[in-house]
Amino acid sequence: MEVKRIALIPGDGIGKEVIPEGVKVLKAAAEAEGFKLEFTNFDFGADRYLRDNGHLIDDDELEELKKYDAIYLGAVGDPRVPAGVLEHGILLKLRFDLDLYLNLRPIKLFDEKYCPLKNKTTADIDFTVIRENTEDLYISAGGFLRKGTPQEIATQEMIATRFGVERAIRYAFEEARRINKKKTVALCDKSNVLTYAHNLWLRAFNEIGEEYPDIKKEHYYVDAICMKMVRSPEIFDVIVTPNMFGDIITDLGAEIQGGMGTAVSGNVNPNGISMFEPVHGSAPDIAGQGIANPIAAILSAAQMMDVLGFETASKKIEKAVIRAMEEKETTKDMGGTLNTAQAGDVIAKFVKEA
Ligand code: NAD
Ligand code: IPM
Ligand code: MN
């Protein structure tokens, strides 16, 4: 029997509530499909940081994680820890040090009744954002001058490398070819203002695009793409974008597909280990109440199965989620009455029946 080893990092807040539901559903899918998943828990996050002298992730732990077939993460971030410490020290460290350079964020409406836009169908909202995941404003370079004075200046550096930009753009064109739907790649940038870093993006996009004559190229500034995503999401197929804008437009994407509780994120290195997580964060405003929607985590688990080569298991999970939505067997953010664990139970049951 084929066995895959998954490293679990539930993290903080609702991360710790939704990951167990994802595991429940994964176990049901593996059993149904005749393969085995072994899970190992890693306790990185706020509790460990506070208990263990500011511990985040060290080099040995990073090496250990590389031995797994995939990482399945909840979310990090906790009001007891200064903003950015856990986000940089855990989440961004994993994305950067494991070179998870593609952040695949599908925007897919599964059930029309959950869409806040008027007159949009499931066919209208179905595209993928490919977010470059290791550059841009996320490199954590910058500093303060005259900190704490009225003359203070803070800088935050944005970088784009030809290598980093090119590998994301190439993947986007290949993806548009592979999914073979609208055969369109849209670049989302702000090259009218960011005339260095995003100019590199625009030039690379146009040059690489010439190698893909079968794929249509479109270009939107980030402000305009927000407007189009709300007004006419049906025009999109594949969007490729620098790190920061990818972060922002995928929260907008989450809302048009049914809410933060449904949005999926795969941090992928096609030649190495990958990490799967919901788009949402640790949601301190609802943490500990058992009401978090586990669907984003569960669909991220489905994406993980797909990348690991278990396409049927992945499809079964997706079908089970769609059925739960259709039957309104959901948490209260989607209008249902279930708690987090009940919502996970229902989806696991539907996976077995799929
Ligand atoms: P958030 O995504 O945690 O929450 C935004 C809003 O969406 C909140 O009102 C929350 O209750 C709601 N929400 C999110 N997920 C939900 C779910 N599954 N079910 C129901 N409602 C849900 O964003 P935030 O409040 O800006 O950030 C909170 C913390 O999470 C911060 O520390 C932030 O840095 C961190 N964060 C971490 C990640 C990650 O680890 N991948 C992602 C985003 C934010
Ligand atoms: C996300 C989050 C992270 C990001 C934060 C927590 C570092 O918002 O995964 O979308 O900005 O990428
Ligand atoms: Mn985000």
Image (spheres, rainbow, N blue to C red):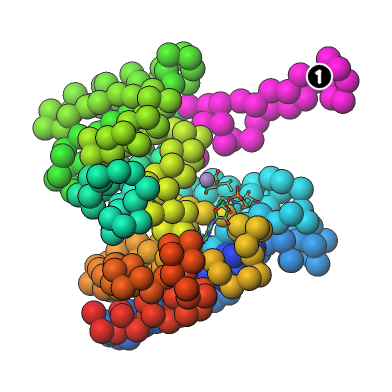
Please say whether residue 49 is visible from this viewpoint. yes
Q: Please, which residue is most extreme toward the right here? A: 149
| Rendered view: 65 above or below 181 | below
For the point 33% across and 67% down, which residue is it?
Answer: 325
Q: Amino acid at mark 1?
A: Glu
Q: Residues within 10 Å of mark 1 (few under 14, many from 20)?
A: few
Q: Nearer the viewer, residue 143 or 184?
A: 184
Q: Is residue 141 magenta?
A: yes
Q: Nearer the viewer, residue 103 or 260?
A: 260
| Rendered view: 99 above or below 337 | above
For the point 43% across and 38% down, which residue is it?
Answer: 249
Q: Quadrant of the C terminus?
A: bottom left
For the point 47% across and 73% down, which residue is it?
Answer: 337
Which residue is label 1 attached to? 152
Residue 47: percent from left, percent from top? 74, 66
Q: Which residues are magenta?
A: 134-160
Q: Quadrant of the N terminus?
A: bottom left
Residue 275: percent from left, percent from top? 46, 58
Please say whether residue 162 is visible from this viewpoint. no
Q: Secondary structure at mark 1?
A: loop
